[in-house]
Each structure stands twice: as structure tokens, then as C-alpha cells.
Image (cartoon, grey):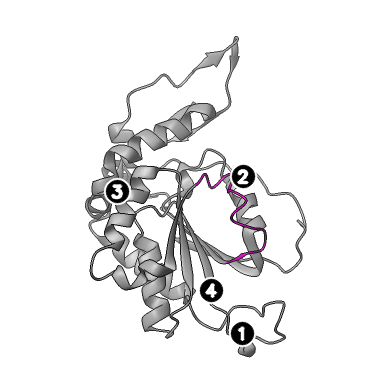
Amino acid sequence: MSQRLVRPAPRSFQKALATRQSYRCLSCSIRLSQSHSSAEFQNGSPQPTTHFGFQEIPSSSKSSRVSSVFSSVASSYDRMNDLMSLGIHRLWKDHFVRSLNPGSKALPPSPSHDTKESRTEPWTMLDIAGGTGDIAFRLLSHATLINNDHSSRVIVSDINPAMLSAGRARSQQLEYEPYTPRLSWLEANAESLPPSIEDNSIDLYTVAFGIRNFTSPSSALREAYRVLKPGGVFACLEFSKVENRVLNAVYK
């Protein structure tokens, strides 16, 4: 399912972000990771834990585990998603992007304009955990072909350099080459984005099938709030729980 949130205009938090327990979901991480004990201790006390597929692991080790897994599957990541979702992930992503309508003039007014109708500035979009460019290419394609927007740009951010390399290589393909000048690639942790992503600088923040891999989703959400412009949009596409027991058994 996808979630679309609009950042309120006030620049200060109305209230602290609530901590939510992330659900456990199937990912390639489970099939490729080594088996570890779920109860790990340090100095006689349990370490803080987080989910990793269907396991609970120390929070301190999740980032390295995720990095190791995605480094090993970067070149075949999109094909693997085809197998895991029977190709349906492409339909989900298409719907996700269409619902956001990138490049339209429907964004809230910028500080220099008073009305929505007068807004003409290009969008600045940040695609988090977007290494292979699957969402970024769709965003720019929609902006260009549907909204005749040839100026909006996308920053593709991923913590894994191998995934970014796969995305860069893909951007050289003929069908994506026209969008290359409007793409930039950033190796960064979504939980602590670099100063180059300034406060109140992003119109649209997207994360597709990536938030489950964050060690601290609440930290990533705080960073999303920081970089989004007042009125900017946070959009998350993620797997949900399988409620049917039979389907859940197959899914696992």
C-alpha cells in the first residue's frame, strides 16, 4: 500500500513523532543472510533490537547486514522483485507515481507566490532507497510526458554504492538517457542525510520498499520532515501484512 502525507506549513514540530513497531516482512535479506541467534547480549544486558525479515537482531548490526545483502543482489534486484511479486510491483509503482502526479502545478504555493495557479518552479524530488532508479525514472517520465515538465529533477539516494552503480548504469540505457541530466546520485543514510540536502528544499520525498530496511524509521521520518518544504509531500510505498493464513504461509 502507499501512503501520501503533506507536510504542514509550520516549520516546528506540533508534537514528537510517535515510535511505531515495524512489522516483519519477507525480503531477500532472509534468504541470503546467515542464521544468527535472536538473543545477543553485551556486558550482561540485552542490546536494543530491531527486525530483519522475520528475525530480531541487534540494532547496531542491521545497517551492515542490509548493506551486505543488497551489495550481493544489486545487479539482479529488479528481476528479483519481479519474481517475488509476480511482476505486480511494476503496477504498484506505476500507480504510486501517477497518484503523485510529479511535475504538475498542483503543489502548494512557494514562498514567492501567493496562489497555486501561479506556481511555475520545477519540482525537486528526493527518492530514498532508490538505488536502481526504478521510481526516479518513473517520476521524470511522468513529469515530462504527462505534464510537459522538462526541468524538475530527482536526487536518487541510497546507502549502498552497489545499488547506485546499478542505477547509474541503467540510466545510460537509451530509454532513460534523456533523463540523465536531471538525475543526481547520492550515497547517504536516510536516517542522517548530509548537509547538501538542505532544510525545506524538497517538494516530494519518496521511499518505495525501503523503509522496512531502516534501523530507525523514526529518525528517517525526522529527516524527511527537515528536508521537505512546508506543504511538501512524503510518499511511502511498502508491503503490508498478509492476513490470510494460507497466503501468509506461501509468502513466507
- What amino acid type should be assigned to the residue bearing mark 4? Trp
- What amino acid type should be assigned to the residue bearing mark 3? Leu
Magenta stretch, residue numbers: 188-202
Q: Mark 3 — residue? A: 247
Q: Are marks 1 and 4 in contact (CB under 8 Å)?
A: no
Residue at the front extreme?
181
**Magenta region includes residue 192:** yes
Nearer the camera: disc 1 or disc 2: 1
Q: Are marks 1 and 2 in contact (CB under 8 Å)?
A: no
Q: Earlier in the sequence, mark 2 or mark 3?
A: 2
Q: Is residue 45 left or right of residue 74?
A: right
Marks 4/3: CA distance?
A: 40 Å
Among the 4 quarters of the image, the one containing residue 133: bottom left
Q: Is residue 179 above or below residue 20?
A: below
Q: Nearer the viewer, residue 163 or 41?
A: 163
Magenta stretch, overall SS:
loop
Quadrant in which the C terminus appears: top left
Q: Is residue 246 left or right of residue 208?
A: left
Q: Earlier in the sequence, mark 3 or mark 1?
A: 1
Residue 153 shows in the view? yes
Q: Mark 1 — residue? A: 119
Q: Nearer the viewer, residue 154 or 5?
A: 154
- What amino acid type should be assigned to the residue bearing mark 2? Ser
